Each structure stands twice: as structure tokens, then as C-alpha cells.
Amino acid sequence: MKQSLQFPKTNKEMEPSSTPLNKAPLHSIRSLHTVVFNRIFAVIYTLALLCLLYHHALKLLNSTTLPSFFVSISMFISDILLGFMWITAQGFRICPVTRQEFPENLEKIVDRKDFPALDIFICTADPYKEPPINVVNTALSVMAYDYPTEKLSIYVSDDGGSELTLCAFMEAAKFGTHWLGFCRENKVMDRCPDAYFRRQYTMNSQTEKIKIMYEYMKKRVENVVESGRIDEYITSEEERQAFSKWTKGFSRQDHPAVIQVLLESGKDKDVTGHSMPNLIYVSRQKSSTSPHHFKAGALNTLLRVSATMTNGPIILTQDCDMFSNDPKTPYNLLCYLMDPSIRPKLAYVQFPQCFHGLNKNDIYSSEMKRWFHINPKGMDGLFGPDNMGSGCFFVRRALFGGPSESSFVQPEMARLSPDYAVNGSIKSEYILDLANHVAGCDYENRTNWGTKMGFRYGSLVEDYYTGYHLHSQGWKSIFCHPKRPAFLGDIPNSLFDVVNQGIRWSIGLLEVAFSKYSPLTFGMRALGPRMSLCYAHYAFSPTWSIPITIYAFLPQLTLLNKMYIFPQVSDPWFFLYVFLFLGAYGQDCLEFILAQGTFARWWNEQRIWIIRGLSNYFFGSLEFIIKNMGFATHGFNVTSKVVDDEQSKRYDQGIFEFGVHSPIFFPLATAAIINLVALLGGTMQILKGGNLDDVFVQLFVAGFAMLNCLPIYEAMILRPDKGRMPTKTTIISIFLAWSLYLVASLIL
Ligand SMILES: O=c1ccn([C@@H]2O[C@H](COP(=O)(O)OP(=O)(O)O[C@H]3O[C@H](CO)[C@@H](O)[C@H](O)[C@H]3O)[C@@H](O)[C@H]2O)c(=O)[nH]1
Ligand SMILES: [Mn+2]
């Protein structure tokens, strides 16, 4: 049977004469006040950039020696790239908007029993980097959504193919029957058990009981992972059956599909007698000879498996460390979905990624305020925010071709179509066989999955890439940012993890930047200039490594060799540099603070930008080039979510964590040394009677860098703890700095 109606009709559609949506609006939108200022400033700044270009051209023409030509051209390239990135950033500033939802009006417009079915996808990939107890917490937090349970299905994708994770979920299913009832009866807001017990809660016999149960479950799950053995935890024949696929030849890279229905809605009840939602464990088939496309591949498998079982028209994609912080979140989503003026072209509603456990001044700028909070508002005034992977509700239909009837892409099996109405028990043999079939590792051969259908393959930032394609096809999206964060996630708390995550993102973004789908070519045509500027800003952000690296070394090395490369203070061109620097930094700071940021956090953000330039962007670009030369690289390196107590203590105190010896710290440490030496050298030149007028800008650049490097000096020399910069890294960096200085002295 085909389903003719995906979403219930709202009263408004049925009776166009009365307009309840006007009396009880579901959402509102308004322009941000900064728009006018942004536009005027953009014009002035662009003119200043043109003047700078002219100035550079003059300098190039007037350079008489090879070294001075080399220096001029390097600075020219740097400023062109900085200017280019600045221009692309204007896409976000041209018409930023902010939205508000009125979920309290929702039930006036649509009955709860008519809510659309919701399929929730949670991805995990490694039980040692992503502790199953955290994944379980994430799952429980969404299982406990305030939503009709018979419409709620949770699919857990385990790319680690680990029996430990399955075992953890069996424990979770049992505990869930207590937890869900407890949350409903007590109207609990924190439905992630771990978050609930970490916060203040009223102690009574009921909370005490549930806490004991939680602790018991947690202990069992942690023990399973620690011992690596599941035998003691198996209590029934059914459970034993579930693990029968883990045979001798079973490995992470090579194993059959494992699909296990842990809870079936309508059949399994919680302790208060209410139905439980569906809970399904899925580990897709893997073979070392078939590409699996990382998270995008996992999501596409879930798309198909869920299609065979529940085929909910709405899909929430969730990282395993991003738990729900508000049980009413689906209500906010429905405020847009139920609006007939928005629904036909709506592909997804994105909630911002928010994080818990940030230290006071957010030293690694893990909040990513610009990426996750400020920029999406800018895109929301155009076609809508980019997709951020987690916390995103998709309309299933949007993953099957463009919004028009004619651009619909029919999957190879009608059974997987977004409008197919499923029926029958999800535990039936027929459905399970089908589900196993579509979870096969060769299933996608010669199909449109990953190209025209589902989540897109070809970039390590599958979220960004998929959102970009959906917009290009004519779909819209919405940025929904309620006051209480809808989801809260973990942050990496060592610089090493931060940098590695950033390297992966850089590679993924460059894969898009230099593909046939580049935002500057394909994007311009498909999306128009403003939206494609936004996408280009992200795609090309790794190119920041070039100007940042040049600015981190060249002014300093030239200063040490008494070569002055910027205008003198008395030269009128000097003021152009002052304006360009203060203008960009000032606007950046203003935006950050207007978005409820603090000055200290902004300062750390700009520092991390420089650090990224010398690490993530730098090595990401390098790895991208290596990859394109045909060498194998890392792929999707999952970020570790394991917390080391000592390390997290240092993090809480706001101390930078280096800890491991790694080449990824070389450029950073070398730059720190060179800048300090240049600052000292430059000061000496003045003391010896040099002209401050000549030296000033270079000295300023070195001083500014030095300020930014304070935590690095501290980590190199002052700190005794384990998180300090390893001596080996420091020594090699000193050697590198020395060599650079020698080479520069020879050339310049
Ligand atoms: O082969 C893989 C690799 C990863 N994952 C899952 O993908 C998610 C994100 O991985 P993580 O290591 O946490 O990456 P982050 O950099 O923190 O994630 C951000 O960036 C990713 C793209 O690089 C997006 O997929 C994420 O949604 C976004 O939050 C996790 O749940 C993983 O379990 C898989 O399912 N299969
Ligand atoms: Mn993550």
C-alpha cells in the first residue's frame, strides 16, 4: 500500500478561510540589527582591500632584488588569500536572521496522535574511543523524548561491529523500561541519565531507586568493556542467539551484518505500562574489499534498514556523544514542518551543536561559536544553514532527489521509497531478512546511493557536503536555536585531539573545494553568489594556512635580517594596514560578543584560528595533496571521547594540553620560538639606535604573535606536568627555528 499523505494536514489547510496559524503562530523570524552596518562596512572594507592590492602592485614593480621580490610576492599572496577569505565571509553577513518557535501553539494546530513518525539514527564507531556507556546515555535521552512512543524508533549504527556495544544496549533496553517511566512521571528535563545525576535533583526514595539502577547498569556496561567478555552477561537464549554472528572470523573490517531488535514498540512496555519506542541495533556488513564510506555509509545503511522497518518521514541524525538536553525538541521541529508555506521545500532543520564541560574561557574555542552559532544565522537568511552532522532533522523525502515531483529519484527497490507505508512486526522474519539484505556491503554497487540518493560520498565532511548538495537541488533548511540547547555534546580536551579533528575537517573541505562541485564554479551556478560564498568560505578555509604561515615567519625572519617590509609609521600607507587589521579584528570581536560571547573567549578564538593555520589547516592541506598524489591516508579518524582524569583537571584549569610528541606541533612551536627571538632582536635594533618608524609593524606582528604564544612558552619551559610540550618536540623545534634563521640569513 502506498501512503498518500506524509504529514497530517493542519487545520489551516483544511479550512483556508479560518487561519489559526495567524492567531496561534508556530514561529517567527526577524532580521538581525547588524545588517545595515555590515553592508556599509563591507563596501568600505572592499575599497580598502583594493587600495592594498594597488599598494602591493607598486611594491612588486619597484622591487629591485630577488629577495625583495620574493618577500613582496609572498606578502602579496598572503594578503590576496586573506582578502579572499574575508570576501567569502560576507556571505554570512549580508542578511542574517534569527528565529523563534512557539511550541506551545503546536497542539492547537495538530493533534499529537497525528505527529509524523520519527526515526532517530545514532552512529558509533569504536567502543574504545567512544565508551558504550556514553552511547547508551545518548540513546536513552532520545528514547525518552516527549513524543508518541509508537512513532519513535531509535536505530544505533555500530561501525565498530562490537559485541560489547550490543551487550551495552541490551542492558540499556532493560534499564530504559524504568528510566522512561521515571522521566514521564516526574517530568524530568534532563533525560540523559548521566546528565540528570550530575545535576541537582531532589533526593527521595524514587530517585534513589532509579539512581541505584543506573549505577548498576553503568557498572555492568563498563565491566563488559573492561573485561572484553560478554558471557557472564547473557541471561537468555534469545540473547545468546543475538551474539551468534560473532564467530571466529569476525573482525571489525570483515563481518556479516548484525541487526537486532532490542525493543519493539507496541509489544515492549515500560514499568508503568506505557509502550516503549523501537530500539534497533545495526552493524552493517563490512568487507575489507568494499569501500564503506565511513559515517555517510553508515547513515545510508540506516536509511535503508529503517525504511524496511518503520520508514518514518522524519529522521534525526545524531553523533553518539550528543545527548538530548530537552525532551520537547521535536516540538520545535514540528513548528516548521507543520507550516504549509515552509514544508514543501524543507529538507532539514538544523539545531546548533552545543557542548557541555567547556572551561571558563574555552581555551580551544571548542564552542565553535562562529561555525555553529553565528554563521548559520547568516545562511538562514538565504537558503538555510549548512548541515552540521549531529542534531539535524531531515525530511526523508529530501534524500531522494530534488523537491519537485519530476526530480524524485526512485530507489532501486520500491520498498525503500520514502512514501512506502510499512506494516507488520519489525521482528518478522521477512523484514529482518530484507533489513540484512540492504545492510550488505555490496548492496550499493551500481546504485545511486551516495551520489544521487542519501548522504553524499566523496568528502570526509559528509554533513557539509550533503547539505550543500541538497541546497543545490533547490531544497531549503532552517536553523532552529532554542534558548535551552536541544543537544549537548562532548569536546575533545587535548590540543592533539583538537588538531586531529581539524585535520580531518580540512581534508574533507578541500575535497569539496577542488572538486567539480566547487562552490566557486558549480555552487555559483546552482546557488547564486551569496549562498555559494558561504559554502566557499568553509571549503577554502584550509587555505588560511598559507597567509598564517607566511605571517608567522616572514616578517620575523626579515626583521632579524634588518629588512623592513611594511610601510613606515610616518607613511600614509601605514594607516591602510591599521584600518585593515583593526577593521577585521574589530568586526570579528563585535560579532562574537553580540552573540553572547566574552572578550576572553574571543581572544582564545582568534588564537585558535592562528593555531589552526599552523596545524589543522597546514597538515590538512598537506594530507590532501598527498592523497591526491595517490598515496593512502588516514580516512575518518574518530575523535576520542575518553576522559583522562588528570587531563580533564588541567583542561578545567584552562591549561593547554600537548602531552604527546608529534610533528603536528612543529610549525606551532617553531613559530613561537622565531617570534620571541624576532621580538627580542627587533627591540635590540631599536636600543642600538635603529629607527622605530621602520621596525614598528614587524615588531608589532612579532609581539602580537608572542602574546598569542604565551601558553606555548609555558608548556615548553615552565610546566612540569604530563601535558607539557614534550622535550623532544621542543628541541626539534628549536633546531628547526635555528635552521630557518640560517637559511633566511643566507637568502635575504
Ligand atoms: O566510520 C565511521 C566514522 C565515524 N562515525 C561516527 O561519526 C560520528 C562523528 O565522529 P566524531 O569522531 O565524533 O567526529 P567529529 O569531528 O566530532 O564530528 C563532526 O564532524 C563530522 C564530519 O567530519 C560529522 O560527521 C559529525 O556529525 C560532526 O559532529 C561519531 O558518532 C562516529 O561514531 C561512524 O559512524 N563511522
Ligand atoms: Mn564528535
Image (spheres, rainbow, N blue to C red):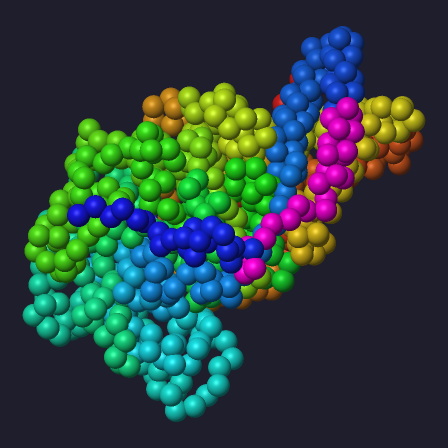
82 and 436: which is toward the camera? 436
**Is residue 57 covered in magenta?**
no
Q: Where is residue 48 in the image (x, y as percent from the top left)?
A: 78, 25
409 and 301: which is toward the camera? 409
Is residue 719 visible in this depiction of the protein? no
Above or below 317: residue 48: above
Above or below 37: residue 199: below
Q: Is residue 283 left or right of residue 26?
A: left
Q: Quadrant of the rendered structure where residue 451 is? A: top left
Q: Where is residue 405 in the image (x, y as percent from the top left)?
A: 33, 33
- Residue at image location 44% in from the left, 65% down from the top: 107
483 and 258: which is toward the camera? 483
Q: In this view, does 117 lie to the left or right of 412?
A: right
540 and 616: which is toward the camera? 540
Q: Where is residue 411 in the image (x, y as percent from the top left)?
A: 23, 36
- Residue at image location 75% in from the left, 20% down from the top: 50
- Residue at image location 43% in from the left, 90% down from the top: 204
Q: In the current view of this chain or complex, which residue is farthest to the front?
A: 17
Above or below 390: residue 556: above
Above or below 216: residue 52: above
Is residue 271 visible in this depiction of the protein? yes
- Residue at image location 31% in from the left, 81% down from the top: 213
Q: Where is residue 546 in the image (x, y as percent from the top left)?
A: 59, 28
The mark tally for this picture is 0
| Quadrant in which the C terminus appears | top right
Q: In the current view of this chain or complex, which residue is farthest to the bottom?
A: 205
**Is residue 32 covered in magenta?**
yes
The magenta stretch is: 23-48
